[in-house]
Image (cartoon, rainbow, N blue to C red):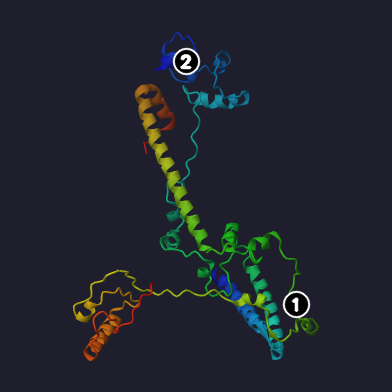
Amino acid sequence: MAEKFDNLEEHLEKFIENIRQLGIIVSDFQPSSQTGLNQKLNFMITGLQDIEKCRQQLHDINVPLEVFEYIDQGRNPQLYTKECLERALAKNEQVKGKIDTLTKFKSLLISELGKVFPEEMGKYKAIHGDDPPS
Amino acid sequence: MTEIFSSLYGQPDPQGPGGASAMGFGPGKPQVPQNLGSMSFPHQMVSVDEGAQLRKPAAMNEPFYLLRVLPMENELTGHTNLITHYNLEHAYNKFCGKKVKEKLSNFLPELPGMIDSPGIQDNSSLHSLIEKPPVCNNSFSPLTGAMLTGFRLHTGPLPEQYRLMHIQPPKKKNKHKHKHHRPQDPLPPETPSDSDHKKKKKKKDDDPDRKKKKKDKKKKKNRHSPDPPGMTGSQPSSSSLR
């Protein structure tokens, strides 16, 4: 899977370098540069063809739209990954806290109900099985 | 405790603890269908359609009436550390353990041009590309000779308004220098002549080797040409702040 990314990355780097050189030629154009300019223009088209071929290998890759917002703001897209992981961990901890609290509440409720309604709780435990207080 | 239920719902029950049988507690039979019509439960949520479904579990789980089947336990819950479960510890340490730089140019250092500026400014945002995709043909065909005649350019440099395209932002060089701004550092006893100079000298170079060299220079100069007191002829006064 990394190979197809490397392939695309290589083509993109060549394409960008070609465009950069094209910009240098155009910035101070000389008559002798015309053939080089024409060559660079055709390289640009072949570069686009190569990138188009890479597209077929990557049709199953999905990119979240939020990453594009980071890129459009000029921010590092790795910050999106970082914030996703931090949010996931925070939510995980929050849910774990809820589970732990409710488990404690359940065991406390069962014990208190067992004191007040011993017979009924005995029947309840017979139906549901003896749930160990977690 | 069960007497409270009977007093709350106003049902005079001959059996003392049986007053709670309407709620499913107590030794009596659960009088589910009849009690629903006779009693007024302000918080009764069971509709007529659901009552048939509930009767089945009530009959199975005597003497409880509203006892439902517990949901299936899911092995993967929020109780487990999902980052460890999905083997994302390395990714977490990589992104959250170290400081991730803010700018896009730190992620793509070899990309030319001003990429840290927002894409809206120069109409190069990815969002606009998604909203309004460019209309193009399916294939890329190379330019013919006739098409290339349209790319014959005039000689000479570009106008100034178009020159900024290939300019890259200046790369900041991190100079790791020890900046100890102490207003009055006590001078070492090796240079007694400097003790006469009471001016504050803030030097840019704090390397110990350079300090030693400067001290040696001071010694040499003091030997050859002794300076009068109050003059700073030996060293240039570097009062420039950093």
Q: Callout 1 environment at 10 Å: few (<14), some (14 to 19), or many (20+)?
A: few
Give how far apart the Cα atoms at labels 1 and 2 are: 86 Å
Amino acid type, mark 2: Leu
Q: Callout 2 environment at 10 Å: few (<14), some (14 to 19), or many (20+)?
A: few
Q: Which residue is the extreme one toward the right?
A: B146
For image coordinates 42% across by 14% down, the residue present is B3
Instruction: Please provide percent x and percent y for residue B48.
Output: 62, 23
Residue B177 drawn above or below residue A29? above
* Image quarter of residue B152: bottom right
Label 1–label 2 contact, CB within 8 A: no
Image mark for residue B98: none
Q: Between residues B44 and B152, which one lies in front from this camera angle? A: B152
Instruction: Please provide percent x and percent y for residue B182.
Output: 30, 69
Instruction: Please provide percent x and percent y for residue B238.
Output: 35, 78
Instruction: Please provide percent x and percent y for residue A104.
Output: 38, 36
For image coordinates 54% across by 22% down, the residue present is B43
Q: Which residue is mark 2?
A: B8
Q: Which residue is mark 1?
A: B141
Amino acid type, mark 1: Ser
Q: Chain of mark 2?
A: B
The quarter in which the C terminus of chain A is drawn is top left
Local SS, label 2: helix
